Image (spheres, rainbow, N blue to C red):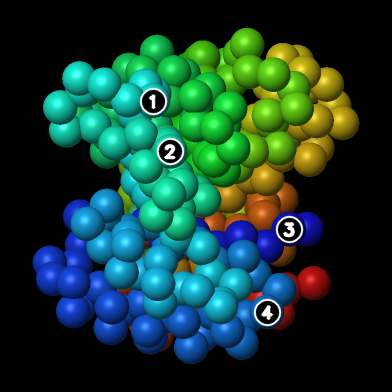
Amino acid sequence: MKRIVIANWKMNPQTADEAISLFRGIKKSASSATKVKTIICCPFVYIPNLARHAKGTKMSIGAQDVFWETSGSYTGEISTLMLKNIGVSFVILGHSERRALGETNEDIRKKVHSAAAENMQVILCVGERERDDHGEYLSFIREEVESALSGLQADLLEKIIVAYEPIWAIGKTDDDALSPSGMHEMSLYIRKLIAQLYDRDIADKVSIVYGGSAEPNNVQLLLDGGDIDGFLVGHASLETDDFGKILQVVNNCK
Ligand code: 13P
């Protein structure tokens, strides 16, 4: 397996000093988790500073969004090239919290296609709001995956990490996360969707991570039974100890 742990700090912390001290704490654990690709997705304003602190480490800095145009009159937006120029190599796209603010599947499709074409690694988030007994949530996931990826050149699929984050599991406790068997099913399903759009070989190579109350207490089971390559971690990534434990578990898994 590939081993990937992504921190999504969301709109935290509130000061640059706090961001640096959190980063420094994580850096210690990340340096001993030598088999894990650790990616810190922080707010835009902290990126230049943290990118300097990340120099000479295996850690990467990621952003939490990017616009699809390359330059021009788009007040408030940030381009892929701008991010690359300050040392960003990963970007989260389609997070449910951005979708909730009005981002559509079409917006996400444009962002995914332009970021991947410009050589950025994309962490594409998909996930349903709730589960139903009739499998409607599977159609929802299908729509999110297909609309984001369809038409993307096959050779750009290596730029995509799919993060499955069921919205109902986000921001809760370790008990509320998806079960390992639920994750296993979803990994198979996402790979099937990608195989239908491309082929089995490409689908097998795409990394899939889980997000939604990933915590030190549940990551081992999810890794053992979930058919995943790692995690997208929200609240536990703001706690140096918790995040360090997650890195350790992923590093030590077989
Ligand atoms: P939590 O780990 O806080 O549930 O957040 C998950 C998430 O949204 C990461 O992108």
| Disc 1 target residue | 70
Residue at 68%, 45% (x, y): give it: 207
- Quadrant observed for ligand 1 in the rendered image: bottom left
| Disc 4 target residue | 34
| Residue farthest right in this picture | 201
Is the residue under label 1 in contact with that under label 3 (CB below 8 Å)? Answer: no
The residue carrying mark 1 has its beta carbon less than 8 Å from ligand 1: no
Q: Nearer the viewer, mark 2 or mark 3?
A: 2
Q: CA distance from mark 2 to mark 3?
A: 27 Å
Q: Quadrant of the C terminus?
A: bottom right
Q: Say the numbered circle drawn on residue 2.
A: 3
Q: CA distance from mark 3 to mark 4?
A: 12 Å
Residue at 54%, 40% (x, y): give it: 120
Is the residue under label 3 in contact with that under label 2 (CB below 8 Å)? Answer: no
Which is nearer the N-term, disc 2 or disc 3? 3
Q: Nearer the viewer, mark 4 or mark 1?
A: 1
Residue at 87%, 31% (x, y): give it: 201
Look at the picture and state if 167 lies above or below 117.
below
Look at the picture and state if 151 lies above or below 224.
above
